[in-house]
Image (cartoon, rainbow, N blue to C red):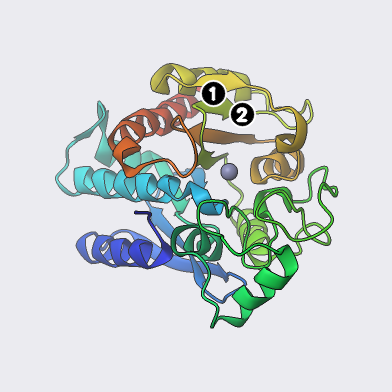
């Protein structure tokens, strides 16, 4: 069992019905014209951007962040405590923007496999030359790895569409990448966290570039979650969302690899992952405020 786009939409509908103070917007559309949603909570000066599921097999990041939003909103609604923080204070201090699923098409392929009646899917079969897509698919519906498609050291690793690591014909060629880039340019965030799986790791630099406060933030996040602070090597080291954010704005951007094991991570890890990463997010918020 996975967590696909339909399930996300159902979760979002329930969530938005229950917590009217949360706002939903559409920041763009995927290759297959699925809306890419963003949920906004809070009205503080500090703007935090969280995004999940750049990669198809990493849908547990979406399930985790929806749970985070639900529990946070519930704590706001009843004026309660959220992991030792006052939820109402958090809402006043920060504006949280969450894109729970950057790559809805890829997640659907990873969870449900290909539908041969779908023209996009027929094209993938001929392009990529494999027929069994579930449990391998990380890319979007055109076989481009969105997290290698950003304009940050963009280069060719693979020459054709693939389940993973094809950077695309040029940087920002994909509508999902464009949606995120345009949104970030418009909103100008203080902090970005891109959730991936797996490994229990926190990445905070791009090609030696770091924001002044990044290392300290990464260490706080590591302390809160039990994850390790890491420097990327090899193909993971360029073209990603946090890479572009660091390069373009000089602000603190992170890739956090949740959980341990093999993708797709089993739903049984959700409780543990929720606890670790709720604390991770909140520790970064606290540290940002102590620095300010
Ligand atoms: Zn990933």
Residues packed near mark 2 inside 10 Å, few (<14), some (14 to 19) or many (20 plus): many
Quadrant for ligand 1 reads top right
Residues packed near mark 1 inside 10 Å, few (<14), some (14 to 19) or many (20 plus): many
Residue situated in front as seen by the camera: 279 or 80: 279
Q: Would you name the residue on which mark 1 appears?
A: 217
Q: Do residues under tags 2 and 1 come within 8 Å of each other at their CB atoms? A: no
Please state the horizontal and vertical placement of residue 57, each as a whole percent of the image.
51, 50
Q: Residue at x 44, y 64 (%)?
A: 112
Please state the horizontal and vertical placement of residue 7, each as a whole percent of the image.
34, 63
For residue 120, above or below residue 269: below
Residue situated in front as seen by the camera: 256 or 18: 256
For residue 153, above or below residue 111: above
Number of marks in the rendered image: 2
Closer to the eye: label 2 or 1: 2
CA distance for labels 2 and 1: 11 Å
Q: Secondary structure at mark 1?
A: helix
Q: Earlier in the sequence, mark 2 or mark 1?
A: 2
In the image, taking residue 184 as reference, residue 160 lies left or right, namely right
* Image-quadrant location for residue 72: top left
For residue 122, above or below residue 180: below
Q: Would you name the residue on which mark 2 appears?
A: 203
Please state the horizontal and vertical placement of residue 195, each as a whole percent of the image.
51, 41
User: Farthest residue toward the left?
Assistant: 78
Q: Secondary structure at mark 2?
A: strand
Q: Residue at x 85, y 47 (%)?
A: 155
In the image, taking residue 29 as reference, residue 98 lies left or right, namely left
């Amino acid at each position: 069992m996975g967590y696909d786009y339909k399930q996300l939409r159902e979760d979002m509908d329930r969530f938005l019905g229950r917590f009217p103070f949360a706002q939903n917007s559409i920041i763009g559309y995927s290759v297959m014209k699925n809306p890419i949603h963003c949920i906004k909570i809070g009205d503080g000066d500090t703007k935090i951007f969280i995004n999940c599921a750049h990669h198809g097999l990493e849908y547990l990041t979406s399930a985790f962040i929806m749970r985070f939003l639900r529990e946070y909103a519930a704590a706001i609604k009843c004026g309660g405590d959220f992991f030792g923080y006052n939820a109402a204070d958090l809402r006043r201090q920060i504006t949280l923007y969450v894109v729970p699923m950057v790559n809805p098409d890829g997640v659907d392929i990873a969870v449900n496999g290909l539908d041969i009646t779908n023209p996009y899917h027929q094209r993938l079969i001929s392009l990529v030359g494999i027929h069994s897509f579930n449990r391998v698919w990380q890319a979007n519906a055109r076989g481009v790895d969105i997290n290698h498609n950003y304009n940050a050291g963009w280069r060719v690793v693979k020459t054709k569409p693939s389940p993973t690591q094809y950077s695309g014909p040029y940087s920002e060629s994909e509508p999902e990448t464009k949606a995120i880039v345009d949104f970030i340019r418009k909103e100008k965030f203080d902090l970005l966290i891109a959730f991936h799986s797996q490994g229990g790791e926190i990445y905070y630099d791009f090609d030696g570039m770091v924001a002044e406060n990044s290392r300290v933030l990464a260490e706080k996040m590591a302390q809160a979650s039990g994850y390790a602070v890491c420097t990327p090597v090899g193909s993971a080291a360029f073209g990603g969302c946090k890479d572009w954010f660091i390069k373009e704005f000089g602000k603190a951007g992170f890739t956090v690899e949740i959980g341990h094991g093999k993708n797709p991570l089993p739903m049984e890890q959700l409780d543990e992952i929720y606890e670790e990463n709720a604390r991770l997010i909140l520790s970064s918020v606290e540290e940002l405020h102590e620095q300010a």
